[in-house]
């Protein structure tokens, strides 16, 4: 039964929660703009690494083409999500 327990997934989930709490601290505490954006950037990059390594199973396959395809797709989805959010929340408001 011990072999079936998803140890890496649980560790990744706990690490994701910890990074989310750190990012939430930016809102809670009165920080300068530069410090807050720096913390958010570091937590976002760490969060992306956790997602790629632990939840997308990067490193479990020997096939390099599959790994690079998964990473490329994850980057594409991330960029589209970020640009779509910026478009609707910031630039879309200015069009009105």
Image: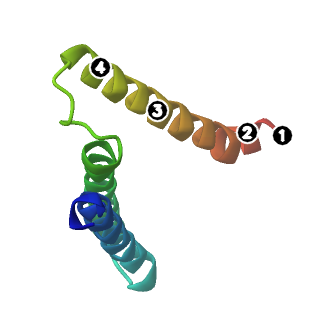
Residue 21 at x, y percent in the picture: 37, 77
Say few, some or many: other residues with alpha carbon within 10 Å of mark 3 (under 14 / 14 to 19 / 20 or more): few
Separation of marks 3 and 1 at Cα, in angstroms: 24 Å
- Coordinates of residue 80 in the picture (x, y in percent): 53, 31
Q: Nearer the viewer, mark 4 or mark 3?
A: 4
Q: Residues within 10 Å of mark 4 (few under 14, many from 20)?
A: few
State which tag comes first along the sequence, 1 or 4.
4
Q: Secondary structure at mark 3?
A: helix
Is residue 91 depicted above or below 7 in this figure? above
Spatial separation of the CA atoms under disc 1 and disc 4: 43 Å
Q: Which mark is residue 79?
A: 3
Q: Is residue 60 left or right of residue 70?
A: left
Q: Nearer the viewer, residue 39 or 30?
A: 39
Between disc 2 and disc 3, whose residue precedes? Answer: 3
Quadrant (top left, top right, bottom left, bottom right) of the N terminus? bottom left
Whether residue 34 is visible here, answered yes or no, is: no
Foreground residue, 38 or 80? 80
- In the image, what residue occupies the spot 34% across and 41% down? 56
Query: From the viewer's perspective, is residue 17 above or below residue 12?
Result: below
Q: Which residue lies under the disc numbered 4?
A: 66
Q: Which one is closest to the eye, mark 1 or mark 2?
A: 2
- Mark-to-mark CA distance, 4 and 3: 20 Å
Figure quadrant of residue 90: top right
Q: Residue furthest top?
A: 65
């Amino acid at each position: 039964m011990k072999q079936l327990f998803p140890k890496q997934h649980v560790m990744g989930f706990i690490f994701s929660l910890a990074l989310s709490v750190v990012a939430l601290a930016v809102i809670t505490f009165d920080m300068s703009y530069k410090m807050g954006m720096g913390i958010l950037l570091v937590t976002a990059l760490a969060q992306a690494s956790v997602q790629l390594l632990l939840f997308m199973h990067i490193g479990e396959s020997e096939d390099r083409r599959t790994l690079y395809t998964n990473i490329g797709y994850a980057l594409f989805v991330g960029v589209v999500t970020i640009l779509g959010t910026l478009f609707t929340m910031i630039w879309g408001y200015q069009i009105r």
